[in-house]
Amino acid sequence: MGIEFVGSGHGEREGTRIVDNPEMNRSRQWDIFCKVIDNHGDIGVCWRLSADLAARGQQVRLWVDDASALEWMAPAGHPGVTVLPWLEPLGLNVLRLGSAPCEVLMESFGCEIAPEFIAACADQQKIGAPKPVWINVEYLSAESYVERSHALPSPVQHGPAAGWTKWFFYPGFTTATGGLLREPGLQQRQADFDRVAWLAAQHIAWAGEKLVSLFCYEPPALATLLHEFAHAGLAGEPVRLLVAAGRAASAVHAVFSDRKWLRPMSDGLGLLSISYLPLLSQTDFDHLLWACDLNFVRGEDSVVRGLWAGKPFVWQIYPQDDQAHQAKLQAFLGMLDAPPSLRAFHRAWNGPGRDLPAVDRSGWIECSSAVRQRLLGQADLGSQLLEFVAKKS
Ligand SMILES: Cc1cn([C@H]2C[C@H](O)[C@@H](COP(=O)(O)OP(=O)(O)O[C@H]3O[C@@H](C)[C@H](O)[C@@H](O)[C@H]3O)O2)c(=O)[nH]c1=O
């Protein structure tokens, strides 16, 4: 089963429909380039995609300028994925191409593939290797430009790759986009997940409180949320907040270091208990989201994992200086068909103020399970990439 890309590609978007295509299962050599700009999303998405493709029989070389996060994100690595340093210049590593010529070239999030690598690919082509399929995987958004831009070609005019075509590939939430990362077997793993055993294995002291994960930047309304949990819990029930390592943990510590915050409380944190987590592998990060009753996620990768978890969630979008993230957030809420209380909460959580409406977890349950169900019915990013490459090879 695969996706058929329809259209000539001369400046027009290519639609998708499901077809059988055995070519998409042929093993190819992929070279994925990743620059770590900020936070963990670049490497998080590139690693997940690399592992997904490798699990489907593809050979992946992941070139990354800073692979340090993989030590905790993917400590076991993945068969079929080789992580290579993206040095400037790439230097001797290009020689490794010799043993396995590149068949699919992928740049992620607008990074530009090292020119010496392109030159090496072009040299290979001169001695008979096929022209690689060159794909630029873009940022995830629910905005309407994504459907218009997905699968558009960009002919390469100059340099050793003149005459090749670079294809824009937009992940997204509709059938007219590249879809979302969703590895095969995800639903089965979710169905087999044992929350009690996982919490015990993480040494999380759980006394039956509502579990809430917190992965965020520094939302100005964080103090208000903690205060609300401490005083009112989640609809009156005690809350255990599972705080992700890094910026989220620092933000929570910063709230508590402001002693004024504690003044209204007479007995510590009232209905709120807190567990600070170590850095988890991506696999365990998923488990965290599956274990919780409410998830606070951020950025690009964890929001998708939050969607697949199917639990009510709140997204802190990655803030951009030009405020472009606000339109992106609105489009996302529209895609969710979010109820008014969820929209209002997102507006506040992503806004500059400290006020926050009440958490309406029970009012958000239907929305999160409906969107998960709908998105599960769409072809995932890995399948779509395989089919696209099969078509363009
Ligand atoms: C906290 C934690 C995260 N992770 C992983 C999950 C994700 O793959 C990754 C976090 O990435 P994100 O959810 O995308 O959030 P992020 O804020 O870290 O990354 C951001 O980076 C910017 C450059 C992008 O422009 C943003 O869109 C965004 O992707 O880290 C773990 O594996 N274990 C952990 O313990």
Image: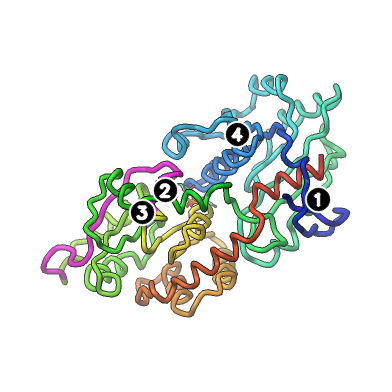
**Above-or-below relation of 289 to 353:** above
The answer to whether mark 2 and mark 3 are in CB contact below 8 A is no
Q: Disc 1 or 3, which lies upstream in sequence? A: 1
Q: Which mark is in front, 4 or 3?
A: 4
Give how far across and how far down residue 2 sits, in percent: 73, 50
Q: Which amino acid lies under the numbered mark 2 shown in the image of this protein?
A: Phe
The disc at residue 153 is 1
Disc 4 element: strand
Q: Categorize mark 2 by other alpha carbons within 10 Å: few (<14), some (14-19), many (20+).
A: some
Q: Identify the residue under disc 2.
A: 285
Give how far across and how far down residue 266 sits, in percent: 11, 69
The answer to whether mark 1 and mark 4 are in CB contact below 8 A is no
Mark-to-mark CA distance, 1 and 2:
36 Å
Which quadrant: the C terminus?
top right
At horizontal 25% and vertical 74% (from top left) the residue drawn is: 236
At horizontal 85% and vertical 42% (from top left) the residue drawn is: 157
Q: Disc 1 or 4, which lies upstream in sequence? A: 4
Residue 147, image quadrant: bottom right
Mark-to-mark CA distance, 2 and 3:
14 Å
Indicate if the residue with disc 1 has its beta carbon within 8 Å of ligand 1.
no
Indicate if the residue with disc 2 has its beta carbon within 8 Å of ligand 1.
yes
Q: Which region of the structure is painted magenta?
A: 265-288
Q: Which amino acid lies under the numbered mark 1 shown in the image of this protein?
A: Pro
Q: Identify the residue under disc 4.
A: 62
Mark-to-mark CA distance, 2 and 4:
21 Å
Q: Identify the residue under disc 3.
A: 248
Q: Which amino acid lies under the numbered mark 3 shown in the image of this protein?
A: Ala
Is 285 one of the magenta-colored residues? yes
Residue 31, image quadrant: top right
At horizontal 46% and vertical 62% (from top left) the residue drawn is: 316
